[in-house]
Amino acid sequence: MKTFYSILYVPIRPEVSERLTVGLLFQSNTKVYFHYSKEKMEVLKHLLPKQAYNLLRLSLMNIERAVLKAKKDTEESLKELFPSENIVSNVISESYIEYLSRYNKNLLAFTSPQYTDIEFNYSNFKILYNKLIAEDEFVSEKIKEPVDIIKQTHASLRPKIEKFVNWDFKVTDKHFKNLILPSIDVDFIGKNGRYISGQTIDFIKPEYVLDNTIAKQLALISAMHEENKQSKCFILGKEPDKKYKSQYKLWHNISYSEIFDFIDVDETEKVVTYLKQNEVHPLEIINE
């Protein structure tokens, strides 16, 4: 099967060929991408009768479910949604799109399959979608896992500094007599006369999680300062989107705090350089 795409559109005023594009299907062999614009559906909600809008929304959701099934289920699963002999190989075939483009023009219509030589991948799908459907809409790839800042930072930083510090370490009152809490887990800690600790924080975590983490770091830096006023606590993180209002305010306060030394996770080489230049070494291991 050649790579092709089909544009989904809603006829607004058929008598003058006015229509609104709402979605894009991009397919090759046994792989398919599909996305429709939620923003344009909001526009259509005000242009169509309620019953017609609900039917349109249901049709798009059915197509979306069929595409998801096409990626992982059997041919029988697809036929539950699209009872047509034209569905083969767990994908929606060109002939079925051709059929839809000819006979489904009352509410939701498809353009005839447009064949292309461009490489079939998500990046090209996004380019086509932004060009043909919604230029400013962000299309998220559902199969992609969100970036875990903490795991990513640990993986890159640990090999570079673990000879200078205790990594993934539990601090107790055996290490600092004025530690208020029974124990505090830190990413790393070391000393060179003064004490140096570090903790990675994902600032889009729920507010109560962040409050708990910061409270522990405050207790730790307080205990370290009791031992040596020059002790330092690195907080590693990333500026969150301003839509996370409370988290953004907390990040701002931490990044400009005189208590902590904030380091962007893209600049962790600063931590490596500091530990090397100041000859930091691990704490003595104390048997509990």
Image (cartoon, helix red, strand yellow):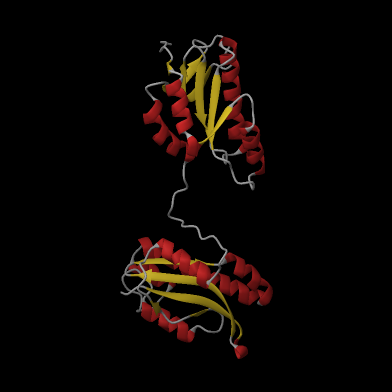
- Counting labels gives 0
Where is residue 171 drawn, in percent x and y?
A: 49, 17
Front residue of this view, candidates 259 and 184: 259
Name the image quarter holding residue 112.
bottom left
Q: Quadrant of the C terminus?
A: top left
Q: Looking at the picture, does residue 253 appear above or below residue 137? A: above
Q: Residue furthest right?
A: 46
Where is residue 287 drawn, in percent x and y?
A: 41, 10
Name the image quarter holding residue 71.
bottom left
Q: At x 52% / y 14%, what residue is drawn?
A: 194
Asked if residue 168 shows in the view, the reply is no
Q: At x 64% / y 28%, what residue is drawn?
A: 257
Q: Quadrant of the N terminus?
A: bottom left
Front residue of this view, candidates 236 and 22: 236
185 sits left or right of 40 in the view:
left
Where is residue 87 drawn, in percent x and y?
A: 36, 75
